[in-house]
Amino acid sequence: MLRTVFDDDHESFRQTLRAFIEAEVVPNFQEWFDAGIVPREFYYKLADLGLFGINVPEEYGGSGLESHKFEAIQYEETMRAGVSFGGSGVHVLLALPYLKMLATDEQKQRYLPKFVAGEEMWALAMTEPGTGSDLAGMKSSAKLSEDGSHYVLNGAKTFITGGVHADRVIVCARTAPPREDDRRFGISLFAVDTHSEGYAVGRKLDKVGLRTSDTAELSFTDVRVPVEDLLGEENQGFSYLGRNLPSERWGIAYGAYAQAAAAVRFATEYTQQREVFGKSVASFQNTKFELAACQAKVDAAQAVADRALEALDAGELTAAEAASAKLFCTEVAGEVIDRCLQLHGGYGFINEYPIARLYSDNRVNRIYGGTSEVMKTIIAKNMGL
């Protein structure tokens, strides 16, 4: 089937990105994988390539485009090469939408030029120890000072991707207690400078997968946050979080589809080269059937991911549609990657092979951004159930 989601400009970008990955990432990725983190200096190279400014208005140093298609190509090309850009994805996919939606003109002048240049890397801190998906249950607090000049932030966050390298973090905290009829009330968002006194990065978490992505625990002890760094209106933070969840979940869905497509590519190449009993593994009927079934599932996931991409760019992707895309693509990816690893035999369990890293990296897709169970709840509610 003819794929129409990308045009010539997108394909030109793809070739540039593919060359960059081959030159700058592939030769260094094993070292990054062993270290469990991407060097901070690498993000300046991503900035020089223009990846941080694609969706940033021109007056702040960006390209002024309003499309997620370039991000989609990044998913496809990094997965194709079996590499990643570390925790930088949250900088654009998670943090930028809040800045564009909530920041005042004065804040954009302060934040966005450094954002585009990679001088300030951003992350998003929502999840707290013990709360998980229940964001309304957060305990972190931000109290306005008596003179009204700053907030005093206290609390802790966990599972914060990009948290080690971040220079600023959008922190969700309570500025008022929840109401009896609305426990979501009272949450506000702050652009917190990570160099502030009382701000601390705890453990870099040792994860099953996504090893080059710096995921950290954060703590705040009487951190002074200037009132000029409040994003949006006080106490309305939960509604802001809800507006950006569809784009976050689209990103997870698209990344999962791209992982599945890469897994089929890796398995096809491996089974064509690997010989047993004097024949290539790919020549056996079982191998052909397994790969054919996986390819059919990837084709379906691609159609879902592309449709969600078009809806997102048009501003029409609903919460239920994003949940459906995430649920479908992540479940398909889990099955496809597992079957492709099986075709690698024992080598599929060795981290030297990209299929092994894909297997580990993929598992979190059904957890973060809202678990598969939460996605089913959203979909069912939309069905009137």
Image (tube, rainbow, N blue to C red):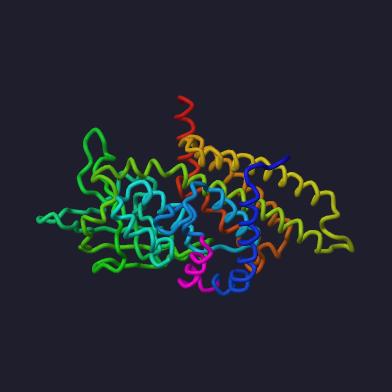
Seen at 21% across and 48% down, the residue is: 175
Q: Is residue 304 above or below residue 121?
A: above
Please state which of residues 338 and 217 is positioned toward the viewer in this rendering: 217
Please state which of residues 310 and 269 is positioned toward the viewer in this rendering: 310
Q: Specify start and end residues of the magenta stretch as a single range.
A: 34-50
Residue 35 belongs to the span the image colors magenta: yes
Please state which of residues 15 and 286 is positioned toward the viewer in this rendering: 15
Q: Is residue 354 left or right of residue 178?
A: right
Residue sitting at the far front = 59
Seen at 66% across and 49% down, the residue is: 336
Residue sitting at the far top = 384
Residue sitting at the far left = 146
Residue 124 spot, x, y in % from top left:
38, 55
Q: Is residue 87 left or right of residue 243?
A: right
- Image quarter for residue 357? bottom right
Q: Is residue 374 above or below residue 193?
A: above
Image label count: 0
Residue 49 spot, x, y in % from top left:
53, 64
Q: Is residue 252 above or below residue 193?
A: above
Residue 288 spot, x, y in % from top left:
81, 49
Residue 271 spot, x, y in % from top left:
78, 59
Residue 319 belongs to the span the image colors magenta: no
Please state which of residues 138 and 113 is positioned toward the viewer in this rendering: 113
Q: Is residue 377 left or right of residue 234?
A: right
